[in-house]
């Protein structure tokens, strides 16, 4: 999903770079404040870990293979601010050393995968943690967050490409989010498997992830939730006025659409698809259904991975009791 | 298991024997940035801009001793992405720049970045970033990441080879759990290493 050079126009590149710089600045500030000095090297090692983990192949059907992206995994292991710093480092090194992702699109890539993807996925995971307590809930949260992060990052990427005029939104958004809704299943599964293994082997490593106090955790969630919402709102802003909405449809039926258009200059030439609002409704319904199905799958996965004393690890105490 | 991206040892220690490698990193980074922005601002194919640029890039690659095949291999490795979006761009209604122009601009940009990456050592890039007053936490993270990138990648390869030597080729579902445990153990090793590094940094007066 790394956007190469020249796929974004200067305006989009500037806006996304400014958003990414703000979010990374916020993350660095919070990491500096909250992270004990003993854990500063863990950021660099975490970034190297993510890079190495991305090279480990997971076989999918017919000879293809997928790999971890790891934003939500690292956010669950180290915390959201650390995750933004880690993903930024990974993307900068991929861009400068391996030419993976353009230099002018670096801000957009950091925004998509490091901020909107990782932190948005982490916020979704926190919601699942509140819903289902215990270790099974945390594993399910990582699985759902991993899937959600891929879909969010793909949607942000599609918006940026479309705002630059590279691809039409009506083509890019369904294609990118559709493909990544499938890829995200793998991402969620790998993240959950890795998270549950770390929880089983070294449960004390997980206790560093979040601030200890309840209010600190809630404040973290609010800050990052608002940051991601703001970034998404800015990315979606160019489309808010060009999507024909219900009102426009009604106006057309009642016959005063031609009067209204004089006052509302559309930023894009009108591409009116018959039954557009119906399509949007169907897509929205499908999206909600898909999200619920993935949530249920994630919860089942959490229950399955955190069985008390399965045959494989007989004799070990169940991790559920070790890390409440 | 083959790594997803081909890693070359010269990423770790680029040869420093040509004049191009010894140029100040500031010049190279600024020059590359100028070229990239210049390419991005071109509305279409203008031979007055692209032909001298290509000539310059070829001359620079010659002077720096970067084999043309290496650049070509890296471009081919990264091109499926460009091809995908270019294909989608081919459906675009007329008006914007055509996908041929887009592909050519992207490949020229890739070429520039690959040449820059192979002639500028990463510590030099970090020095420039420090001069630009990038927050030190990010620079420390980048420096540590670059130092341990290849260490951890090789560690992951060793773990996978050891796993393959000890087990039969399992079914896919089992393989996923095994690979995930390799990733999990890699994280555990990385965090243990981070603790040791912190102690070593303290012993050397880091604050």
Image: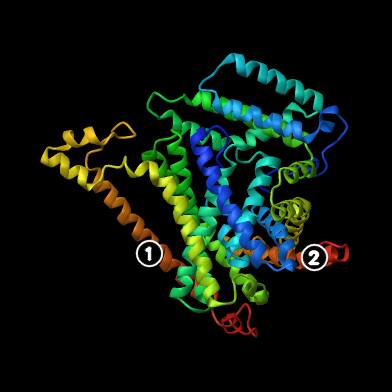
> Label 2 marks which chain's residue?
B
Q: Are marks 2 and 1 on the same chain?
A: no
Residue A202 percent location from the top left of the image: 68, 75
> Mark 2 against mark 1, which lies toward the viewer?
2
- Work out whether B140 lies above or below B190: above
- Image quarter of residue B184: bottom right
* Residue found 82% across the figure and 31% down from its top: B23
Q: Is residue B179 visible?
A: no
**Nearer the observer, B122 or B73:** B122
Quickly name the residue at label 2: B198
Quickly name the residue at label 1: A292
Residue A38 percent location from the top left of the image: 75, 68
Q: CA distance from mark 2 to mark 1?
A: 43 Å
> Label 1 marks which chain's residue?
A
Residue furthest top in the image? B48
Alpha-carbon neighbours of circle 1 within 10 Å: few (<14), some, or many (≥20)? Answer: few
Location of the C terminus of chain A by quadrant is bottom right
Q: Is residue B165 visible?
A: yes
Left or right relative to B7: residue A218: left
Residue B33 percent location from the top left of the image: 66, 32
Left or right relative to A282: residue A259: left
- Work out whether A299 lies above or below B81: below
């Amino acid at each position: 999903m790394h956007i190469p050079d020249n796929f974004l126009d200067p305006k989009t590149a500037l806006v996304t770079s400014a958003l990414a710089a703000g979010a990374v600045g916020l993350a660095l500030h919070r990491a500096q404040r909250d992270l004990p000095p003993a854990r500063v090297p863990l950021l660099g090692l975490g970034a190297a870990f993510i890079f190495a983990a991305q090279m480990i192949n997971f076989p999918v059907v017919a000879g293809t293979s997928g790999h971890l992206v790891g934003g939500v995994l690292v956010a669950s292991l180290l915390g959201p601010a650390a995750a933004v710093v880690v993903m930024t480092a990974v993307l900068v090194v991929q861009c400068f050393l391996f030419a993976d992702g353009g230099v002018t699109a670096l801000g957009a890539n950091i925004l998509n995968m490091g901020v909107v993807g990782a932190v948005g996925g982490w916020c979704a995971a926190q919601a699942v943690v509140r819903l289902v307590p215990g270790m099974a809930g945390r594993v399910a949260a990582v699985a759902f967050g991993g899937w959600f992060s891929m879909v969010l990052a793909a949607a942000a990427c599609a918006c940026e490409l479309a705002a630059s005029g590279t691809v039409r939104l009506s083509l890019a958004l369904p294609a990118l989010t559709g493909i990544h809704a499938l890829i995200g299943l793998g991402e969620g599964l790998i993240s959950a498997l890795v998270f549950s293994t770390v929880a089983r082997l070294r449960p004390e490593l997980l206790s560093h992830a979040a601030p200890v106090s309840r209010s600190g955790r809630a404040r973290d969630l609010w800050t990052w939730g608002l940051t991601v919402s703001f970034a998404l709102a800015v990315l979606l802003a160019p489309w808010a006025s060009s999507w024909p909405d219900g009102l426009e449809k009604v106006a057309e039926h009642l016959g005063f659409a031609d009067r209204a258009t004089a006052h509302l200059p559309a930023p894009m030439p009108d591409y009116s698809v018959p039954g557009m609002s119906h399509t949007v409704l169907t897509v929205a319904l499908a999206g909600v259904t898909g999200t619920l199905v993935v949530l249920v799958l994630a919860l089942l996965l959490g229950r399955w991975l955190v069985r008390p004393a399965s045959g494989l690890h007989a004799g070990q105490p169940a991790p559920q009791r070790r890390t409440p | 298991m083959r790594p997803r991206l081909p890693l070359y040892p010269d990423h770790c220690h680029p040869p420093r024997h040509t004049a191009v490698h010894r140029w100040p990193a500031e010049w190279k980074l600024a020059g590359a940035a100028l070229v990239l922005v210049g390419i991005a601002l071109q509305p279409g194919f203008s031979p007055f801009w692209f032909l001298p640029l290509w000539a310059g890039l070829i001359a620079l690659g010659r002077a720096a001793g970067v084999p043309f095949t290496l650049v070509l291999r890296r471009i081919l490795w990264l091109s499926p992405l460009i091809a995908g979006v270019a294909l989608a761009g081919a459906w675009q209604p007329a008006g914007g720049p055509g996908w041929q122009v887009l592909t050519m601009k992207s490949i020229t940009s890739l070429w520039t970045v690959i040449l820059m990456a192979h002639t500028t050592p990463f510590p030099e890039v970090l020095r420039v970033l420090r001069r630009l007053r990038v927050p030190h936490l990010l620079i420390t993270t980048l420096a540590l990441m670059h130092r341990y990138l290849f260490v951890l990648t090789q560690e992951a390869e060793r773990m996978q080879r050891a796993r393959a030597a000890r087990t039969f080729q399992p079914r896919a579902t089992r393989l996923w759990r095994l690979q995930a445990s390799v990733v999990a153990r890699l994280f555990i090793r990385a965090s243990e290493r981070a603790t040791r590094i912190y102690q070593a940094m303290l012993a050397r007066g880091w604050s």
